[in-house]
Amino acid sequence: MEKVKPMDEEVCKDLLETLKEIKKALTLKDAEELKELSDHTIHCSTLHHEKRAIYIAMITYSLSKIIEKGELQRKHSEELEDFINGMIENFGALIDFLEKRDFAKFENAIKNMLKDISEFDASFGKYVEDVLEFSKIQKGTKIYEHGLSLSSVAEMIGVSKWDLMKKIGETKVHEEIKPLTNVKERFEKLKKLLEK
């Protein structure tokens, strides 16, 4: 059995606070706040190469897109309400596992949440439009903006380089990115971004 990697204590504390904010925003069905929290989580994950934080960012962004779908709310409000309530419970479990530093259960809960979003997406695909895949690409673009290589980003989020390149080409992010010459320069840039 593969051993679960522990999380850096600073990342753990930051992610724990963010998870509490995500749970609160989800309870209020605040899509904009969820997007902002997703972006905050990306900053954390990029700096520390913490893949679990990337998945939290993708889940959070996916949920914001699901909440925004007015057609889904009008035609399937009961199913949507059940789904959101289940996700709120899942975030409660994530918080509990992270507080106990039970990283194995934490990772397993993330996998189950990703599966739940995929299944919900499959059931209501015409309304949700594959939000999980969309969110992976969106979050990958944000990570790329922080100066990581295209290959590293694609591997971290589990998408092909070609899908990521297509999205980066659409957003013209590549024109705004100036290549960073060394690791120290990348670290300093990320540090400044986090201070904003």
Image (cartoon, rainbow, N blue to C red):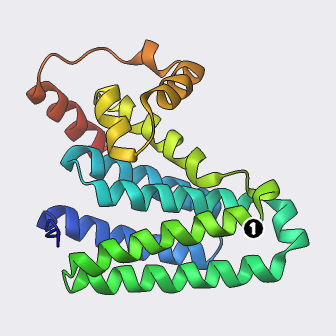
- Judge left or right: residue 71 versus residue 57: right
Question: Residue 119 lies in what quarter of the image?
Answer: bottom right
The secondary element bearing badge 1 is classed as: helix
Give the answer, above or below, for where 95 lies relative to 34: below
Instruction: Return the x and y of residue 164 as percentages of the image width and height.
Output: 48, 30
Q: Residue at x 83, y 69 (%)?
A: 73
- Quadrant assignment for the N terminus: bottom left
Residue that lies at the very extreme toward the front in this rendered image? 1
Give the answer, above or below, for where 104 lies relative to 36: below
Q: Residue at x 45, y 12 (%)?
A: 175
- Quadrant assignment for the C terminus: top left
Instruction: Return the x and y of residue 65 as percentages of the image width and height.
Output: 66, 56
Question: Residue 106 lies in what quarter of the image?
Answer: bottom left
Whether residue 67 is visible to the viewer of this picture, yes or no, is no
- Judge left or right: residue 191 versus residue 36: left
Nearest the eye: 158 or 44: 158
Nearest the eye: 195 or 178: 178
- Looking at the rendered structure, the number of numbered marks drawn on it comes to 1
Q: Residue at x 90, y 71 (%)?
A: 75
Whether residue 135 is visible to the viewer of this picture, yes or no, is yes
- Judge left or right: residue 53 versus residue 56: left
Instruction: Return the x and y of residue 111 as percentages of the image width and height.
Output: 42, 69
Nearest the eye: 14 or 135: 135
Q: Residue at x 82, y 77 (%)?
A: 77
Amino acid at the residue labelled 1: Ser
Give the answer, above or below, for where 22 lies relative to 163: below
Kindly identify which residue carries mark 1.
123
- Judge left or right: residue 63 versus residue 151: right
Dot 1 crowding, Cα within 10 Å, few <14, some 14–19, many 20+: few
Nearest the eye: 34 or 53: 53
